């Protein structure tokens, strides 16, 4: 079928809306009419080739829409179902079998290879266009996904807001609720008050943290973080965030979360920890980026640094949990969203990069 999709043809250059050909779903695949798709910093990073996925390429990995057709062997969803698209996993490797699909041994080939695992592509256009990004490439009017990354939603689900749960919001909230698991009364500081960081702050509040600290450089983002869950905010352009966190908590934070991928900020997030505290590193930086920390500081304080992918989530279980928290008024991630027409994708990326918009969502319909 003929579709419209946003194609990036050169590193760092604007997306171009083009007409492409899309395959019919094969065995295990699902054809989805995309209603909306979140714009994640991972999309922007890959557009800039921080991760060298082959170009030209259709990006997008926070899609939401309605199933139009399914290939042979698909039983999880049927035509007419509302769905959310997330990351794909093989469901067969050791990590998947033990309940850790975010660390699937086939994660790279299933999500960031720029093609199906067999090397073919579901999208076709001028210059051997690549797709299947996160097994969806949802910057398009229609997408081919796979059964493992399709999450069936309730009939009353709002497709205009759910897309970001597929990656960014899931990552921030899941890091807190699934990996760090703070006890009620503990403290947590988030470095970077974007969508992922504020999701982490909201999750910390929902988990019962009594001191939730947001660190950023943009006053509007700090104000939004305070509205949605942060008990304290720190503008790192005005004060030393390490000293401020120690002043607020009395000894350092029990947990810190870095969403910035700025190496100097990661170092601050580690140094702001209390003894035996844990720093979770989520930010997506350029491949090969190295972080330096003081070995003696780790040794003498028992601090831990851990990397987290996709919030350690089992999406079929975790996404419904987040939607229930939304219904309860305890996780208002919808307040992070600004909607853009699909044709305005480059403005959405620019606003996200510049800090004007916390979470852009593209409307395809």
Image: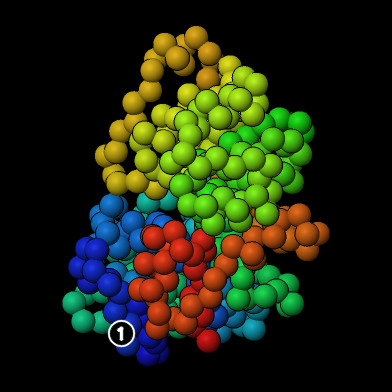
| Residue at point 30%, 46% (across, down) | 286
Report whether residue 78 is seen: no
Q: Is residue 149 left or right of residue 283?
A: right
Q: Is residue 138 above or below residue 304?
A: below
Look at mark 1 in the image and give the residue it sits on. Answer: 18
Quarter of image, res 133: bottom left
| Residue at point 42%, 34% (across, down) | 266
Quarter of image, res 137: bottom left
Report whether residue 358 is seen: yes
Give the image location of residue 22, x and y in percent. 37, 82
Give the image location of residue 21, x and y in percent. 33, 85
- Here the colouring is rainbow
Q: Is residue 117 above or below residue 188?
A: below
Residue located farthest toward the front when viewing the structure as drawn: 238
Q: Nearer the viewer, residue 144 or 325?
A: 325
Secondary structure under the numbered disc 1 in the rendered image: strand
| Residue at point 35%, 36% (across, down) | 263
Q: Is residue 58 left or right of residue 174?
A: left
Give the image location of residue 36, x and y in percent. 53, 76
Give the image location of residue 142, x and y in percent. 46, 81
Residue located farthest toward the right when viewing the structure as drawn: 328
Q: Residues within 10 Å of mark 1 (few under 14, many from 20)?
A: few
Q: Is residue 126 left or right of residue 81?
A: left
Q: Is residue 299 above or below residue 144?
A: above
Q: Nearer the viewer, residue 10 or 206?
A: 206
Q: Nearer the viewer, residue 226 or 313?
A: 226
| Residue at point 37%, 41% (across, down) | 262
């Amino acid at each position: 079928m003929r579709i419209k999709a946003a194609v990036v043809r050169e590193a760092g250059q604007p997306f171009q809306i083009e007409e492409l050909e899309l395959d019919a779903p094969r065995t295990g695949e699902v054809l989805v009419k995309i209603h909306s798709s979140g714009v994640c910093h991972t999309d922007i990073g890959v557009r800039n080739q921080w991760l060298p996925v082959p170009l030209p390429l259709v990006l997008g990995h926070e899609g939401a829409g309605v199933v139009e057709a399914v290939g042979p062997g698909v039983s999880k969803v049927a035509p007419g179902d509302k769905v959310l698209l997330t990351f794909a996993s093989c469901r067969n490797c050791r990590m998947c079998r033990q309940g850790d699909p975010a660390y699937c041994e086939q994660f790279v080939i299933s999500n960031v290879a720029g093609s199906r695992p067999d090397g073919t592509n579901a999208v076709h256009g001028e210059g051997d266009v690549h797709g299947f990004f996160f097994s969806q490439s949802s910057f398009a009017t229609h997408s081919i996904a796979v059964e493992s990354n399709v999450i069936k939603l309730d009939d009353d689900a709002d497709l205009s807001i759910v897309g970001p749960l597929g990656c960014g919001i899931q990552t921030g909230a899941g890091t807190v609720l699934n990996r760090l698991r703070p006890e009620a009364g503990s403290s947590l500081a988030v470095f970077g008050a974007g969508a992922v960081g504020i999701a982490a702050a909201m999750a910390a509040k929902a988990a019962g943290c009594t001191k939730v600290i947001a660190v950023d450089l943009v006053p509007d983002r700090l104000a939004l973080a305070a509205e949605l869950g942060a008990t304290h905010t720190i503008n790192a352009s005005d004060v030393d965030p390490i000293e401020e966190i120690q002043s607020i908590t009395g000894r350092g934070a029990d947990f810190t979360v870095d969403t910035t991928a700025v190496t100097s900020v990661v170092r601050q997030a580690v140094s702001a920890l209390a003894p035996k505290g844990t720093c979770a590193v989520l930010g997506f930086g350029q491949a090969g980026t190295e972080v330096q920390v003081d070995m003696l500081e780790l040794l003498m304080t028992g601090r831990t640094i851990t990397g987290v992918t996709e919030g350690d989530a089992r999406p079929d279980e975790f996404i419904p949990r987040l939607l229930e928290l939304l219904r309860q008024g305890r996780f208002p991630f919808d307040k992070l969203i600004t909607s853009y027409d699909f044709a305005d994708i480059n403005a959405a990326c620019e606003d996200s990069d510049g800090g004007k918009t916390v979470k852009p969502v593209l409307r395809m319909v």
